[in-house]
Image (cartoon, grey):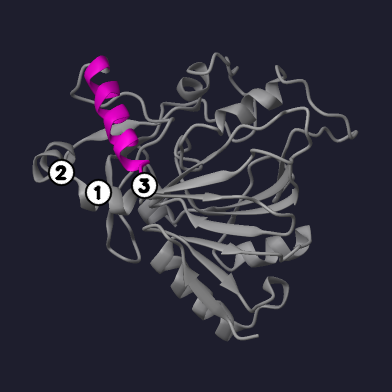
Amino acid sequence: MPLMIEPMDATLGAKVTGLDLAALDDAAWREVEAAFNRHALLIFPGQKLSAEAQLAFARRLGEIEVIVEGMTTVPVSNKAADGRLLDADSHRMQLLRGNEGWHTDSSYMPLSAKASVLSAHVIPPAGGQTQWADARAAYDALDAATRERIAPLSAYHSYFYSQAKIGHKVGSGAGYGFFDGEPPLRPLVKVHPVTGRPALYLGRHACRIPGLADDEALALLDTLLEFTCQPPRVYTHDWRPGDVAVWDNRCLLHRARPYDYRQERVLMHTRIKGNPETEMATNYRVASA
C-alpha cells in the first residue's frame, strides 16, 4: 500500500496511511516531516507502537523533553501503576482534568515544546476524544485592527494559574514539569521558525499581559481563544487503540474531552523540546555554548 496523506476537513491536520512508523526509512520520514510542517497535525491510524518505537519516532523530531524524572514517555491515564482506577479528586486526576482546557504543551516552562506524540492504548466507550485548534488560521482570520492591537503584546504563562482556575492548588516543587520561577513571557503572535506563518500563541496557561489591567488582559485572551477554537479551525479525533498523533505545539492548541472517569483510558505521551533559539521565553536568555 503506497504512502497516502489525506488532509482533514478542517484548516489543519492530515491522516497518514501506508507506512509503519516502527520501520520508517529516511525517504518516508522526509515525506512525513514535510506533511508535519504543512498540516501541523498528523494522525496515523492503527500503528500499535511499542514504547520503544514511539520514542524512536519522536526522536526524529528532536530532543526529548523529560516531563517526569526518569521517563521519556509518560502515561496519560486514569489508571494507577497497580491497576486500580484513580479517584476523580486525586492530584493526578486534577492534572488530567486541567488538560481538558485548550493549551499548548510546556508554554509554562522557560523552553516551550516543539511537538508532541500521543498514542492510544485503552479507550473508553464514549468521550475521551482529543481536539486540536489551528492558531495559524485563526491569526489569518483576524481583522486588521485586532492584528495591530496584539502585535506588540505578550502574555505570562503559568501552570499555577491555569490549575487554580479549575480549583486545583498546585504546590511548589510538585513535579511533572511544573516551573516555580517567574512565569515565562511569550508574544501573543508567534512566527513559525520553519514555515514563517504567524499564529496566535495562547491557551489556558496565558494570564497577565504587561501594560494591560488584569481584567482587560483576561478579556482579550478569552476573546482570542474563543475565536481560535471555532470551525473550520478545529479537528476532533475519536481514538481507536493503536492510533498515533503527532502535532506542532508552535502553532496548534489542543485539549482532551471529558469521559466517564470510571472507565479506563490509557494513552502514552512523548514530548519534543523546542529549539532554544525560537522557543525560549522572552524573559529568559538562551544559555551560551
Using the rendered view, name the quadrant where residue 38 is placed.
Answer: bottom left
Taking 166 as reference, is 119 left or right? right
Amino acid type of disc 3? Pro
Q: Residue at x 59, y 68 (%)?
A: 60
Q: Can you give x and y, in whole percent of width and height, for residue 185 in the image?
A: 34, 34
The label nearer to you, 1 versus 3, is: 3
Chain-order first, disc 1 or disc 3: 1
Note whether 172 is above or below 49 in the view shown. Answer: above
Circles 1 and 2, Cβ within 8 Å, touching? The answer is: yes
Provide residue 287's location: percent of width, then percent of height: 43, 49
| Residue 203 vertical position relative to residue 27 in the rendered view, above or below | above
Given residues 5 and 108, the one toward you in this image is: 5
Which stretch is magenta? 215-231
Tell me the SS state at disc 3.
loop
Residue 240 at x, y = what percent? 70, 54
Q: Which residue is mark 1?
A: 139
Q: CA distance from mark 2 to mark 3?
A: 20 Å
Residue 221 shown in magenta:
yes
Q: Kindly identify which residue carries mark 2.
A: 147
Q: Residues within 10 Å of mark 3 (few under 14, many from 20)?
A: few
Instruction: Specify few, some or many for label 1: CA neighbours under 10 Å numbering under 14, 14-19, or 20 or more.
Output: many
Q: Which residue is mark 3?
A: 231
Q: Quadrant of the C terminus?
A: bottom left
Task: Quadrant for the N terminus, please.
Answer: bottom right
CA gap, disc 1 to disc 3? 14 Å
Of badges 2 and 3, nearer the viewer stands 3
Observer able to see residue 14: yes
Q: Are marks 1 and 3 in contact (CB under 8 Å)?
A: no
Give the number of the disc on residue 268. none
Label 2 close to label 3 by CB (< 8 Å): no
Give left or right: position of 202 versus 243: left
